[in-house]
Image: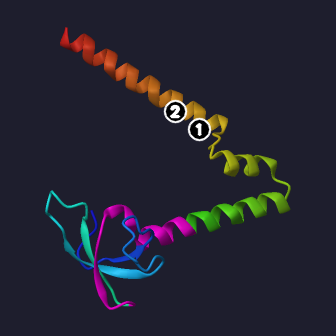
Amino acid sequence: MLRLGEKIVIVADAFEQNLPVGGYGYIIAYDRNPDNAFDYVVRSPKTNRNYFVPSSDIESEQYLIQQEVDRVEREALIDFALSTHNEKLFFQVMNGEIERSEEEEEAIQEAMSQAEFIKQVNLRAWI
């Protein structure tokens, strides 16, 4: 749920209210009426009006900025991998996979074995 006074961006117009899609606004109230389809009252300084909007029509500005940062970062990594002919990095970025080295794999197995050991000790101590 978005906070009062939070800066938002209007991303859709589901009820065709002539909302300024792509414009920004501020949440000025919650609509708590359960019989109503709208969730928020948004003030748009661009049009100098208040709008009743559902939560699907708006997004937090910080969330949209973070999505754009992630997209640009991913594209930069792809460009770097292509320019340096780094096939491993390219496939890692494209597939979203994180490959672990052998040392990390062994550390994970040791941690698992310690956890199993403690579990066994606790079981025997309980009996």
Task: Say which quarter of the image contains residue 35.
Answer: bottom left
- Quadrant for the C terminus in the image: top left
Amino acid of disc 2: Ile
**Could you tell me how far apart the alpha carbons at marks 1 and 2 are, in whole angstroms?**
6 Å
Q: Is residue 41 magenta?
A: no
Q: Which mark is residue 69?
A: none
Is 23 on the left or on the right of 49, as rendered? right
Q: Which residue is mark 2?
A: 108
The residue at the point 82 percent across, 58 percent down is: 82
Q: Residue at x 56, y 69 (%)?
A: 69
- Residue 47's spot in the image, x, y percent? 37, 90
Residue 97 position in % (x across, y down): 63, 43
User: Does 74 sit left or right of 119 as displayed?
Assistant: right
Q: In this orientation, which residue lies closer to the viewer: 56 or 104?
A: 56
Q: Decide: few, some or many residues near mark 1? Use Cα within 10 Å; few <14, some 14-19, many ≥20.
A: few
Would you name the residue on which mark 1 appears?
104
Please provide the residue range marked out in magenta: 46-68
**Helix, strand or loop for disc 2:** helix
Please say if the residues under marks 1 and 2 sit with CB atoms less than 8 Å apart.
yes
Nearer to the camera, 53 or 75? 53
